[in-house]
């Protein structure tokens, strides 16, 4: 089990490495909400009618909670009463929209009124906007949308996938499944491209930009997949716990392959809405998977068939990946390409994580007995994973300031 005579400097150096790892994992966990994800993507649908514009902005609850005034007013949008929620809409959401979203028609500002805010699903909130008198009083009117929501709050990481339709209806009358014939184009709002312009007739959209090319969409979703896993700290903790026990290169490759196949299956099925699981249940099982693997590392010095455990939990992690993509790509002919591109991004990010973890573990193994490294890292991972588990089971936020 190694040299029994260990000098004090070696002990101090080992503790220094361990403390650094603990602080790194702990600081990452402090910077995120209970879901352990920073999902910065959103979606929106814009309906251009004869003389009106209706918009449906879809955002995750964590993003809505970032609106200026939510935290300052100590509002808990998930649990506030109807009266408090009306206050949030009036005092926070509408002023925020007024400040961050600008719509002009023929160079005349047209304020967007918040008509409705509701929770669409476990992972999405809807903010409905209306411009009732859009001013489409010319044969061809020029429309400009300047979207700046959430850029400051996410360090310019937010992206909103906007789908543009020609459809004349009030918000209450917009059908859930929009006819394909009404779809015009898609535009991506981000910090570097926050303005969209088009020409509109009184009877609907006259001309719109064709949007990004197929290769542009592929590159965009690959980048989104990379970002999702690199900011999905619970997935990173799970991967670290899997390999820190000191497996051979062959076993690590089996784990990578099993995890890739498993989460690719459920990511595709969930995003295409073939299979659906409650998002809270998924998040709880993901936290449980972290705790299980970390405990197995502590109580067993060698593990067999870890790839099989990885495959089983990987199926659940796939549903977690889908939360960053589900319902954000709708009404598109290249839906399957977008999903596969996002998954390719996830795989790329996963390989990046392994290429960082494995050399670091190798260097630590040269300096210290590997069992010690396994124990220290597994204890840290279990502590973080157990905290996430408690938060998700009891709907708490223990490490938020």
Image: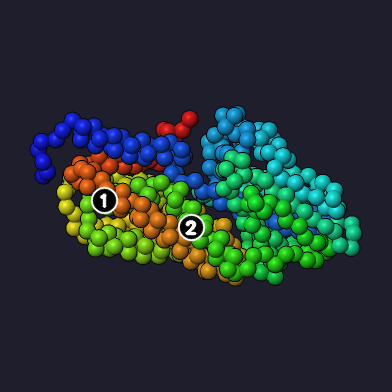
Identify the residue at horizontal 49%, vertical 53% (top origin).
Answer: 227
Identify the residue at horizontal 61%, vertical 41% (top origin).
Answer: 152
Identify the residue at horizontal 43%, vertical 60% (top origin).
Answer: 348
Asked whether 33 or 176 is in front, the reply is 33
Q: Name the residue under label 2.
A: 225
Taking the image as shown, residue 366 lies to the left or right of residue 391, namely left
Taking the image as shown, residue 236 lies to the left or right of residue 184, namely left
Residue occupying the far right of the picture: 138
Quadrant of residue 149 within the rendered picture? top right
Q: Is disc 1 surrounded by few (<14), some (14 to 19) or many (20+) residues within 10 Å?
A: few
Instruction: Please say if 87 is above or below 200.
Output: above
Q: How much space separates mark 1 and mark 2, taking CA atoms? A: 28 Å
Q: Where is residue 316 in the image (x, y as percent from the top left)?
A: 37, 56
Taking the image as shown, residue 69 lies to the left or right of residue 243, namely right
Q: Position of residue 102 (x, y in %)?
A: 75, 46
Secondary structure under the numbered disc 1 in the rendered image: helix
Q: Is disc 2 surrounded by few (<14), some (14 to 19) or many (20+) residues within 10 Å?
A: many
Q: Where is residue 235 in the image (x, y as percent from the top left)?
A: 38, 50
* Count of marks overlaid on the render: 2
Asked whether 104 or 50 is in front, the reply is 104
Secondary structure under the numbered disc 2 in the rendered image: helix
Asked whether 342 or 202 is in front, the reply is 342
Residue 144 visible, this orientation:
yes
Q: Mark 1 points at which residue?
A: 362
């Amino acid at each position: 089990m190694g040299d029994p005579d260990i000098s004090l400097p070696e002990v101090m150096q080992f503790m220094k490495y361990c403390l650094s790892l603990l602080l790194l994992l702990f600081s990452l966990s402090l910077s995120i909400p209970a879901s352990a994800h920073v999902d910065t993507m959103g979606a929106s649908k814009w309906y251009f009618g004869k003389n009106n514009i209706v918009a449906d902005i879809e955002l995750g609850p964590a993003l809505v909670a970032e609106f200026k005034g939510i935290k300052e007013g100590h509002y808990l949008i998930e649990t506030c009463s109807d009266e408090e929620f009306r206050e949030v809409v009036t005092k926070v959401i509408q002023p925020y929209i007024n400040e961050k979203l600008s719509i002009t028609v023929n160079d005349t500002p047209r304020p967007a009124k918040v008509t409705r805010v509701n929770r669409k699903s476990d992972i999405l909130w809807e903010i409905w906007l209306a411009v009732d008198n859009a001013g489409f009083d010319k044969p061809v009117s020029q429309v400009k949308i300047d979207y700046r929501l959430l850029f400051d709050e996410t360090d310019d990481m937010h992206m909103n996938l906007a789908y543009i339709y020609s459809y004349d209806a009030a918000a209450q009358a917009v059908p859930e499944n929009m006819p394909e014939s009404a779809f015009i184009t898609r535009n991506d709002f981000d910090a570097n491209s926050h303005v969209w312009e088009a020409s509109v007739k009184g009877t609907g959209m006259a001309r719109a930009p064709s949007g990004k090319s197929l290769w542009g969409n592929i590159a965009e979703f690959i980048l989104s997949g990379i970002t999702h896993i690199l900011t999905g700290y619970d997935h990173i903790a799970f991967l670290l716990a899997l390999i820190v026990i000191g497996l051979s290169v062959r076993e690590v490759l089996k784990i990578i392959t099993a995890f890739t196949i498993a989460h690719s299956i459920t990511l595709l099925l969930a995003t295409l809405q073939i299979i659906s699981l409650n998002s809270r249940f998924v998040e709880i099982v993901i936290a449980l998977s972290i705790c299980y693997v970390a405990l197995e590392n502590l109580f067993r010095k060698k593990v067999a068939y870890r790839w099989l455990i990885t495959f089983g939990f990987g199926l659940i992690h796939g549903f977690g990946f889908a939360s960053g993509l589900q319902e954000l790509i709708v009404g598109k002919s290249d839906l399957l390409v977008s999903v596969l591109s996002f998954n390719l991004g996830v795989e790329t990010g996963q390989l990046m994580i392994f290429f960082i973890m494995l050399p670091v573990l190798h260097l630590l193994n040269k300096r210290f007995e590997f069992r010690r490294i396994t124990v220290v890292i597994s204890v840290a991972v279990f502590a973080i994973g157990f905290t996430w588990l408690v938060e998700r089971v009891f709907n708490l936020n223990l490490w938020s300031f």
